[in-house]
Amino acid sequence: MSLRPDLFPPIAPVTGPQPRPFWSVIVPAYKPDYLEQCLRSVMEQDPGAETMEILVLDDASPHTLEPIVRKVGGDRIRYSRNVKNLGTYGTENAGVAMSRGLWTYILNDDDFVSPGFFKTLQNDLANQPANVGAACCLYVNVNPSNEVIWRPQPLQPTAGVLDRMAWLNTICVQNPLNPVAVAIKRSTYEQLGGYCLKFGYCGDWEFYQRSACHVDWFYEPTPLAVYRQHGQNESSKALRTGQMVDEIRMAIEFTHPLLPPEHRDRITATALNQNALTALQTALNLLQANDTQAALAQVQAGLRLSASPQIIEQLVVLLAQPAALPFRAALPQFFAALQFNP
């Protein structure tokens, strides 16, 4: 089943009498640059085929990826090449549909896992009640040279199930997660559907919100996953155009009717306002880096999220910056082109 098959592609249950592994590791692959390190981080903690299946989905890459896969994992890794490019979420949906594991883990080809990732999370999740349908852990960001450049604050100090209402107030306002640090029970996809193909960048956050409205999440505070931050990330490109902010608004709108009725208006209003503030802060950072066009895109997208008094006050602060002179010169045309969301 799926909540809305027109938006969320259905994921059929696993059939057949064969025993199922605990893990399905799904690696959507397109670029070769970091693929070997990504796969080695999985193979170095491989518990065997009875416990883990490993799938690499080549998204019709123009690069030759299969030799890298075979070099690292031989026949232990199942390699499949898409007939045509499906994009991020199309490929992830295809991987989930192919999977047989009880829990799925999607690892992008430029990220990697730290030692103990699979063992720790399996120990955490193996005896959890049926309503626990998703899990996440602490992660770190590294640069292309594998140097740690940022780590978020833990969601809570100890491992355990997150309080449902507190988690809704967090995940449905802004996204503190990174896909590299998230595992989803396959039955959750079967219940709710896969990733919405209307998104190019924020489909994961929309799914996290959707799932948080229906299943409980487990949290592991150990930093076990590594996200590689570099200028070629698709998210970095979307940030500069404002598309990321527009997709944030769409995700918030999709989630609104799923929230508890007595809380949905408050959570939605907070989400719109907080993400608009983030967009304006990003615009200020871009202005200070002399990237006027990207800053302008952020401001326009932020005001499409919210034009509350707090947002207008922050916009005035931004426009007072010396670097904002190009904005001030074009204010009439700038505001005429906006569609406000008060």
Image (tube, grey):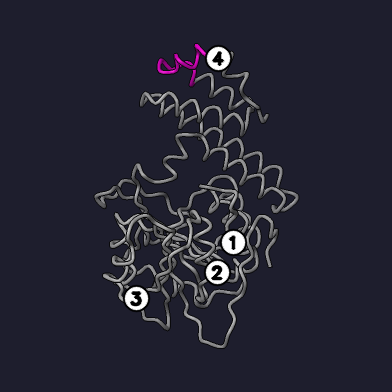
Amino acid beneath label 1: Gly
In the rendered image, residue 187, in percent from the top left (x then y), is placed at 60, 71
Amino acid beneath label 4: Leu
Q: Nearer the viewer, mark 1 or mark 3?
A: 1
**56 or 185, which is in the foreground?**
56
Q: Is residue 233 above or below residue 212?
A: above
Which residue position holds label 3?
Answer: 46
Q: Nearer the viewer, mark 2 or mark 1?
A: 2
Packing grade of label 2 (10 A; few <14, some 14-19, many >=20) is some
Earlier in the chain: of badge 4 and badge 2, it is 2
Quadrant, the N terminus: bottom right
- Single out the residue that lies furthest toward the right: 261
Q: CA distance from mark 3 to mark 2?
A: 22 Å
Q: What residue is at 54 percent from the left and 38 percent from the top?
A: 245
Q: CA distance from mark 1 to mark 3?
A: 26 Å
Which residue position holds label 1?
Answer: 194
Q: Nearer the viewer, mark 4 or mark 2?
A: 2
Earlier in the chain: of badge 1 and badge 3, it is 3
